[in-house]
Image: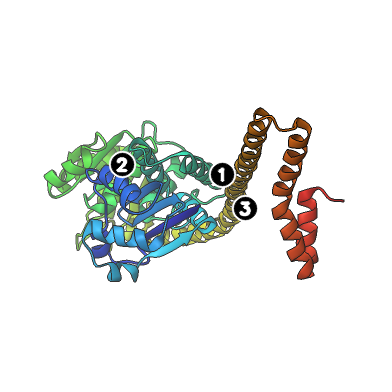
Amino acid sequence: MTVLALGINHKTASVELREKLAFTPERLPEALLSVQNDAGCDEGVILSTCNRTEIYGFGDNADAQEVIDWLASFHQVDAQELKQHVYIYQDVAATKHLMRVASGLDSMVIGEPQILGQVKQAFQEAKATGAVQSYFERMFQQVFSVAKKVRTDTAIAVNAVSVAFAAVTLAKQVFGSFDNKKVLLVGAGETIELVAKHIFEQGAKDIVVANRTLSRAQKVAEQFSAKVCTIAEIPEQIQNADVVISSTASTLPIIGKGMVETVFKKRKHKPMFLVDLAVPRDIEAQVAELDDAYLYTVDDLQEIVARNMQARSEAAQEAEVIIEDKASMFDDWLNSLESVDLIKEYRVQSLAIKDELLERAVNQIQAGNDTEQVLKELANKLTNKLIHAPTSALKSAAEKQNNQELAIIKTVLGIR
């Protein structure tokens, strides 16, 4: 029995190659059936994300080259080119790799949480098509348990490692929660969209997105039930804002010290938390001079992110120890399966010898042969048949003077 993990990721292949090897939801069921029928795997799971495509296979005839050829054929890419970018893990190394992937240790951002959900979805899709049987059922459930333990027992996912998440985390530390807090997001690019996602997930419900192009602001806002306004309306909207986070491509500041000073007079100096993620700056640096304004720049957040990345790296080392231990335990279980199969095979072989000799003895008795003589012959032949292989093994070990092998055979045979 062989376990294979084979694939490409953001570290081994360009985005162009990753795009070619991605599995669409429409073709995934077909691919899973094909892995079983055409790639020599009894069981198969396909993990396909923007950063990786991986094939997990299991079976007596699972072969890495065969899977590579199948993957190249399925996506119509050159097998030799693909082979230059593919990584291959087998047996306990394959199990360990999957545990690292599910725990976020193999991700572009260490500890990112989305990958565990993607692995679970890949497993469920494979199970729905019948590509998962008893072995992968056991293996993937163990992987999910390990990933949960890594996140519970280490700080792998605790600290913010993007400026967007760091901004939201810092705001939450200031306010405790976002209940009844008004949020103004300035800009509608990728960074602000990510900020909106994080702050919405953290409980903020009163969000306004300000942008020069309202249609773009609306695309961001509709995902989080937010309102929209133009840049020109910021002086009005900022009056009620507790949190202001800005990231635009403007060459000049959008929020100046005078604007915020005027706002503070109207809101009776109620504190305001501001984060400027833009370069050049969207918020004048002098805003930080105001008593009730708490202004952070992208440089401030980068320092937080750097510290948190170091903390995650240390947590990753703890996670590796957990994975090493659990992967080894799972490998022991796999080896025990092989011993179970050997025991079954030995029993079947022994029972076949018994049945053959017994049938011959019964026939002799029915033919009128002396019963006592037939039983003696049965006992002798059965004994000789059963001890033939162990006797040969003992002779061979003795001739080679292999004391270790002799000790093992004696233990197996119960000889003291």
- Looking at the rendered structure, the kind of residue marked 1 is Lys
Q: Tell me the element at label 2.
A: helix
Look at 71% across and 53% down and name the residue there: 388
Expressed as whole percent of the image width and height from the top left, the position of residue 279 reads 28, 63
Label 2 Cα crowd, 10 Å radius (few <14 / some 14-19 / many 20+): few
The reply, left or right, for residue 336 in relation to residue 161 is right
Expressed as whole percent of the image width and height from the top left, the position of residue 142 reads 53, 43
Label 1 Cα crowd, 10 Å radius (few <14 / some 14-19 / many 20+): some
Can I make out residue 369 in this image? yes
- Marks 2 and 1, how far apart at CA: 51 Å
Q: Tell me the element at label 3.
A: helix
N-terminal of the two: label 3 or label 1?
Answer: 1
The reply, left or right, for residue 95 in relation to residue 65 is right
Outermost residue, right side: 416
Question: For this rendering, which residue is in front, 312 or 335?
Answer: 335
Circle on res. 96: none
Can I make out residue 292 in this image? no
The reply, left or right, for residue 143 in relation to residue 68 is right
Tell us which disc is closer to us: 2 or 3.
Answer: 3
Tell us which disc is closer to us: 2 or 1.
Answer: 1
- Looking at the rendered structure, the kind of residue marked 2 is Lys
- Looking at the rendered structure, the kind of residue marked 3 is Asp
Q: Tell me the element at label 1.
A: helix
Look at 53% across and 46% down and name the residue there: 151
Q: Mark 3 points at which residue?
A: 325
Look at 63% across and 37% down and name the residue there: 360
Expressed as whole percent of the image width and height from the top left, the position of residue 197 reads 32, 43
Q: How many marks?
A: 3
Circle on res. 149: 1
Circle on res. 265: 2
N-terminal of the two: label 2 or label 1?
Answer: 1
Question: For this rendering, which residue is in front, 255 or 262?
Answer: 255
